[in-house]
Amino acid sequence: QSLPKTPSTGPVSAIRNPPPRTSSLRPFQPPPYAPNFSVAFHCLLIARLISALYNIIADCDEVYNYWEPVHFLQFGNGLQTWEYSPEYSIRSWFYICIHSGIAWLASVTAAQKIQIFFVVRSTLAVASAVSEACLYRAVVDYGMPYTARYLLLFLLASTGMFISSTAFLPSSFSMYLTTLAFAVSLQRPSSMRSAIYVLLASISVLVGWPFAGATAIPFAIEDVFFSGAGRWRRLAALAMASVVCVGSLAFCIASVDSLFYKKWELVPWNIIAYNLFSGEGKGPDIYGTEPWYFYLLNGLLNFNLVFVAALLSLPVLIISSVFATTRRTMTVALKLLPFYLWLTIFSLQPHKEERFLFVVYPLLCFNAAYTISAAAEMMESRRGGAMAKMMSLTSKSAKTMFCIVFVLFSLSRTVGLHLHYSGPIHVFAHLYTSLAPPSAGLSSPVAVCIGKEWYRFPSHFFLPSTARLRFVRSSFEGLLPKPFAEGVRLTDATSTPPTGMNDRNEQVIDDRLVQEPVEGSCDYMIDYFGADSSAEPDGLYPNLKSDVETWEQVLCVPFLDAPNTVGILARTLWVPETLAASARQVVPSLVGEKKWGDYCLFHNRKKREMAGARATENNDEL
C-alpha cells in the first residue's frame, strides 16, 4: 500500500490496456478459399480418367516389360524381354501380380480384352488422383493455402502429369507412393509420421523403383535434425521402421519371385547391380545416351513455365527469408530439395529417358507452386502508399498471366500428343474389332506382323485371342522380345530361360523372326509411311503400299511426320489451323506446316485367296 500507484497513462497501463486498432493496421482477412479434399479429388479424377482414355503409350518398355507379362498371366500368351529371363531376373513378378489381379477382377465383367486394358489404366488413374489429392490437402493443412491452390492447378493441367499418371511403369508407381510419402512429411513430427513415411517409401523402393529412395534423404535429415526435441527417439523409430518395413517387404517380394523364377532372387538389388555394376558393353548406356540438358528441355516441353518456376523455388526461398516473409526457411528448403536432388542425379547419368523423371513430377508442381505464392507474398507484403498498390496490382496480373499461359500451352501440348501420335492405338483397335469374330481364310492363330514399327505395338490386349504378333526382320539391329512358352505350366514358362536372349542388346535371328517372303507368313501387317510415301519404308521387306497385288490396304490413320515437319511449335503443339496459318506468316521457322504420314493396316490378299481355295477344294472332296 505504501508503493506509489502506477499512473493510468504510464507504460504498464499501455501494456495491460492496448489501444484499439487504428486504420493504419492491416484489417482482419479471412483465410483464402481452398477446395476441400473431395472437390480436389473429383477434379483430379476427371483429369486422370481422361488420361486413361486418351494417353498414348510413349515407351515400348511399358508394353513389353509390363503389359505383356500381365497379358501372359491373364490369357496364357505374351511377349517377354531379356529382363524376365531367369538368367538375369531384373524384373519383379510381384509388381506384375498386383496389376494382374486388377486385370483378373476386370475380366469378370469385361467382355473384351481391350476393355480390361482400359480398366487397368482407369485404376491407375484413381491411384494417381488419390495421391495427388492427399498431397494437395496436406499442403493446405501445412499452412500454405495459396501454394496449395497453385499446386492443384498445376497438377490438373500439366502435360507431364497427364502422361505419367496412367503409365503402367514402376516410375509411375513410385510417383504415387512418393507423393503420398511427401504428403505425410508435411504433418507434425512424430514417431507415427516417421513410421508411415518409411512404409510408403519402402513400398516405392522395393515394389516400384529402387532409385526412388533418393527422394527420402531430405526427409531423413529433417526428421532427425530439424524436428525439435526427441532427436534420438525419432532416429530410433526411423531405424526400427526401416528394418521392419524393408525386411518384411523384401521377404514377400522374394517369395513371390521365387515361385516364378524357381530360385531365390532379390530383384531390387539385381536392378541396382545391373544399372551400376554391369561392366563394359552392358548396362543402360548401350540403349543410348543424351546430353546433360535433356531433362531441362523435356521439363520445358511437359511443364513449360511451371518447370522454370520449379527451378527457381530455392532462390525464391532464400530471397524471401531475407525479406522475413518466410519463417521456416530450413524446413521448407528440405521440402523443396527432393526435386533438385532427383533432377541432379539423373542429369548426371548418360542414359536418360523421360519416364525417369516421373517420380518427382508432383514435387516439381509443389516447388513451382511455392515459387509463385512466395514471390507474390513478397510483392504484396508492402503496406500503404502508391508503390505498394502498384506492386500488388503487378503481382496479381503476373500470376494471372502465368496461369493462363501455362494452361494454354499445356492443353495445346496434351491435345497435340493425342492427335499426332495416337495412330497405333487406333489401328490396332480397328484390327481387334475386325478379328474378334473368327474370319474365314485366315491361319490359326492369325499372324499379325510388324517390322520397323515394333516399338509402337500397344500389347496383345489389342489383339484377340486368335491372333499373335510376329516380328518381321527390319533395319532395327537390336534384340527383340520373345514369346512366353505356351501350352506348359505357368511357372515352367517363367522359369525356363528363353533361347536367343542376351543383356548386350545384340540381334538374334531365329525362326521366330519373319524373313522373306513376308507374304507367306503374315495374315496382316502394320507399317508406317512418312509424308513422302513413295520412299521405301524399310529396305529389308517390301513396300506394302506399292505391292497392291499382295497387300490390301484396310485402314490408314494420320501420324505426324515429325522429322519432316518444320518448326518446333508445329511438332510439339496443337494449334487451330486458322491461328497456325496466321502465325506461320509471322514466324515460319517456329510454326511451319505439319507433315503427316500414314499409319496403315494391310491384309494379305494372296494368303486369304490361297486359304479360300484350299477350303473350296476340301468342300468339293467332301
Image (spheres, rainbow, N blue to C red):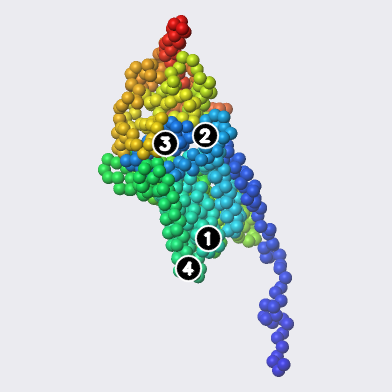
**Residue drawn at 53 percent across, 21 percent down:** 437
Q: Which mark is residue 117?
A: 2
Q: Which mark is residue 233?
A: 4
To which quarter of the image does residue 141 belong? bottom right
> Taking 485 as reference, is 28 left or right?
right
Q: Which residue is at the far top?
A: 620
Q: Is residue 332 above or below residue 573?
A: below
Q: Say if mark 1 contacts mark 4, CB within 8 Å.
A: no
Which of the two discs, 1 and 2, sits closer to the camera?
A: 2
Crowding near the residue tagged with mark 3, few <14, some 14–19, many ≥20 C-alpha atoms within 10 Å:
some
Q: Which residue is mark 1?
A: 193
Residue 584, given in percent of the width and then of the height, sits at 51, 29
**Residue drawn at 49 percent across, 39 percent down:** 100
Residue 586, given in percent of the width and then of the height, sits at 51, 31
Q: Secondary structure at mark 4?
A: helix
Marks 3 and 4 sit apart, C-alpha to C-alpha, by 48 Å
- The numbered mark, 3 or 1, whose residue comes first in the sequence reads 1
Q: Which mark is residue 151?
A: none
Crowding near the residue tagged with mark 1, few <14, some 14–19, many ≥20 C-alpha atoms within 10 Å:
some
How many callouts does the rendering have?
Answer: 4
Which of the two discs, 3 and 2, sits closer to the camera?
A: 3
